[in-house]
Amino acid sequence: MRVQKIYLETTVFNFCFADDAPDKKLDTLRLFEEIAQGKYEPYTSAVVIREIEQDATSKRDKMLDLVEHFNIAVLPADEETRRLAAIYVAEKIIPEKYAADALHIASTTINDLDFIVSYNFQHIVKMKTITMTESVNLRERYRRIGIYSPTEVIEHDE
């Protein structure tokens, strides 16, 4: 079976250390365990790294360490990624103020990854974004990508 390629958005790194959200923290840690077991091939982007580097909390270095520890490939935001993200913004899928969220989705699409994992329910993991990005992707001749939270991706104990 082919290993699925996943894009880890900024919130995923953050929730590894979210003591105030124990269920999300547990699910996120399970996702990283599954990555370590080889279930997923992990990717992130230079946009995520920039967002993490701007974090002024004590979690900043720990989040950056996750990228190295789990050998997460960092994708550049190339011209084609920026072009597709601009379409998501122009079509009001993602508000212009949150254009970085459009870059996360576009990076997943352009790099032919299977899905993006995020806890950003405001702009990324929501029905409007899922259906409208799928429509744009098909029109622009890209395949559909999945958009999920870590809770939806991990294996749950029966």
Image (tube, grey):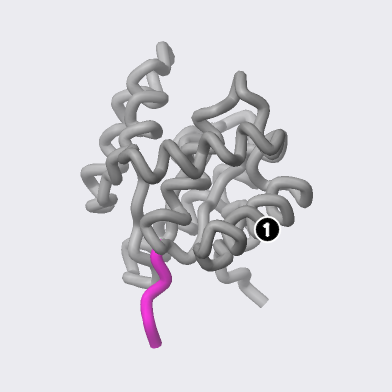
Q: Which residue is mark 1?
A: 135
Closer to the camera, 68 or 147?
A: 147
What kind of residue is marked 1? Answer: Ser
- Would residue 104 be counted in the magenta stretch? no
Location of the C terminus (image quadrant)? bottom right
Question: Residue drawn at (37%, 57%), measured in percent from left and top?
Answer: 111
The image shows a total of numbered marks equal to 1
Residue 60 vs residue 110, the one in the foreground: 110
Q: Quadrant of residue 42?
A: bottom left
Examine the rendering and report whether any part of residue 146 can be seen. no
In this view, the residue farthest toward the right is 127
Residue 75 in percent (x, y) is at 29, 45
Give above or below for 112 relative to 106.
below
Could you tell me if residue 106 is visible in this image? Answer: yes
Residue at 77% over, 51% down = 127
The x, y position of residue 79, in whole percent, is: 34, 39
Q: Quadrant of residue 41?
A: bottom left
**Please, which residue is most extreme toward the bottom here?**
1
Write the start and end of the magenta stretch as one range. 1-5
In the picture, measured across the screen, residue 153 lies left or right of residue 128, that is left
Q: Within 10 angstroms of label 1, few (less than 14), some, or many (20 or more) residues?
A: some
Q: Secondary structure at mark 1?
A: helix
For residue 155, above or below residue 148 = below
